[in-house]
Image: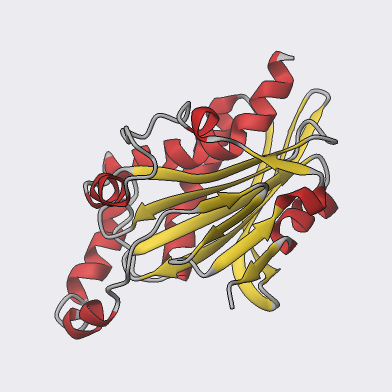
Amino acid sequence: MREKFRVIMAGVVLACALTACVNNGGGGSEAKGNIESKAKKNDDSDKEKKVEFSVGEADEDVYSNKMLGIKADVSSNGMKLANNEELSSFDTGVKDRSDTAEVQDVLDKGGIFVDMYAYSTEHGMDSINIVIENTKKTTKTEDIDSYIDAVIPKLEAEFKKTGFSEVKVEKAKLTFLGEEVTGISTGLADKDIQQYQKQVFVQQGDYVATITSAAENEEQALAGIALFEKIE
């Protein structure tokens, strides 16, 4: 049971640990140089990036987030959405998850927010989570490709700390919302445990949402990413 719990929680725990690492300055010097060199150039574009911040909503087992422009019916993949009480166990410093202003304030101070967590009722090790951060305050990166380059070494290190003996984290082309995008593909193994994770990203202004689908095999991990649709 202890081993199973470690695998189920890996996606969320490592996303949180990753943000903690970059907040402590790890791997930030190169990214900082990039953003400083482009700061003046991006003054006008930053103004255009302002978006109306929103947190996700749940209707039964259908998740949606207007800011991200995505939705997913997780029940179609035999999954359930965690409720607010369960989500509160991922302590992010947010007292009221429905208070948009409070959540935004936490993010704008360099924190993270677990916007969604879904778990399988059929396959105990399958899960999907969405973690939102303000990358201007965390990784100091400006685009998804730079963000991925910055976080891959952090992910590798954190997975090894978690106890996986075999860790492979790499850039990958994945299909998300009907388009080919650059994401992260991860393979993990330890003793009799094997897990695959697929990560894709949605950027809105300064905010980036990391969508992680974790499963015992690659097909199921990809199926979790395929659940998402655009909000019309």
Q: Quadrant of residue 190?
A: top right
Q: Can you give x and y, in whole percent of width and height, for residue 79 in the image?
A: 75, 43
- When the figure is inspected, residue 192 is found, relative to residue 53, above or below; the finding is above
- When the figure is inspected, residue 214 is found, relative to residue 173, above or below; the finding is above
Regarding residue 109, the answer to whether it shows in the image is: yes
Q: Can you give x and y, in whole percent of width and height, for residue 122 in the image?
A: 85, 36
Q: Quadrant of the C terminus?
A: bottom right
Label tally: 0
Q: Quadrant of the N terminus?
A: top right
35 sits to left or right of 116: left
- When the figure is inspected, residue 87 is found, relative to residue 184, above or below; the finding is above
In percent of the image, x 79 and y 57: which residue is there?
Answer: 223
In percent of the image, x 23 and y 65: which residue is there?
Answer: 33
Q: Quadrant of residue 198?
A: bottom right
Residue found at the far front of this picture: 59
Q: Can you give x and y, in whole percent of width and height, for residue 196 in the image?
A: 74, 45
Q: Can you give x and y, in whole percent of width and height, for residue 73 in the image?
A: 71, 56
